[in-house]
Image (cartoon, rainbow, N blue to C red):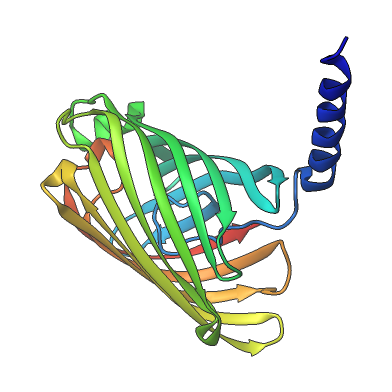
Amino acid sequence: MKYKIPFLLFLFFTSTILAQDFGLKFFPEKKVFERHYADAISHQVSLSKHFESTEWFANIGVNIPVFDISLFKYEVQASASTTIFNTIIKTPGHIQVYTVDYLVDFYFDTKITEDLAARFIFGHLSAHFSDDGIVELGNSPISYVRDYIGLSGQYKINQLNGKIYFTGFYNFHNEPPRDKHSTFQVGFDAGHYFLKSLKGYFAFDLKVKSEVNNGTTQSFQAGVIFPSDQRFKFRFAYTHRRGFEERGQLYNQKDIKNSLGIYIDF
């Protein structure tokens, strides 16, 4: 009995403090991290036409903030993202799909300052030839899989209406090759408002991949965003990409691609 009253008082004061400093909000509208425009495997809905061939790149993806949790004024946003990346060849009267890649990411984001944010990533990527792909490319399918964790930082540059970001990934399971585990990414974008709801931008993304002996993938993108002041918006952009492929089945092949595409951001 002599311990009961102090214990109850402890529970009362602890629950009172937590009730004041604890918060939980499901499906928040505002995202902590902004989109990486030039990243070839950013989660998004898009359709792009390759200039040098009859290839089209069709991505169907989404990033959904699931909840914001706060404790003692420290806030974390948890979100889930998934995208299917398809590469297709359009011929008269027929569409051939020859690569299909699946990407799933779970993000845990927090603001360090008003302009600086940090992110922890847990993800999975797997890649496949479709039936048309095996016929078209004449290659044997491989088991391409990456399970990874990552740490990312993003800093807003308000004077340039843009941001810079950097990410380090560690593949704790990857095939092939099994002994190459790291990928490093850095990028930025900057923009200019022509009207209140129309924004032009330029973006750059660089990845250094140990799986191709520290070879790189370099992406340059320029376009416009409309309406830029709304959550649901469209991007029209030209992309120049060079270096090693982002598609898993073709991960060790180098190429130069130019494309024009439409993107839906939300």
Extreme left residue here? 213
> Can residue 157 be seen by looking at this rendering?
yes
Task: Establish if 179 lies above or below 95.
Answer: above
Query: Looking at the picture, how far across and down is residue 209, in whole percent?
Result: 21, 49
Locate the C terminus and report the quarter of the image it occupies.
bottom right
Query: Looking at the picture, how far across and down is residue 150, in whole percent?
Result: 38, 44
Extreme top residue here? 1
Question: Which residue corresponds to the image point at 14% horizontal and 51% vertical from the top-left?
Answer: 214
Question: Which residue corresponds to the image point at 26% horizontal and 35% vertical from the top-left?
Answer: 249
> Can residue 102 be seen by looking at this rendering?
no
Quarter where residue 22 is shown: top right
192 or 96, nearer to the observer: 192
Quarter where residue 143 is shown: top left
Residue 118 appears left or right of 52: right
Task: Establish if 241 lies above or below 128.
Answer: below
Task: Establish if 11 lies above or below 212.
Answer: above
Residue 113 appears left or right of 17: left
Query: Looking at the picture, how far across and down is residue 208, in whole percent?
Result: 22, 55
25 or 245, nearer to the observer: 25
Residue 179 appears left or right of 150: left
Count of marks overlaid on the render: 0
Question: Which residue corresponds to the image point at 48% horizontal and 70% vertical from the top-left?
Answer: 237
Query: Looking at the picture, how far across and down is residue 215, in whole percent?
Result: 15, 54
Extreme bottom residue here? 194
130 or 254, nearer to the observer: 254
Task: Establish if 128 lies above or below 245.
Answer: above
Question: Which residue corresponds to the image point at 60% horizontal and 73% vertical from the top-left?
Answer: 225
Locate the N terminus and report the quarter of the image it occupies.
top right
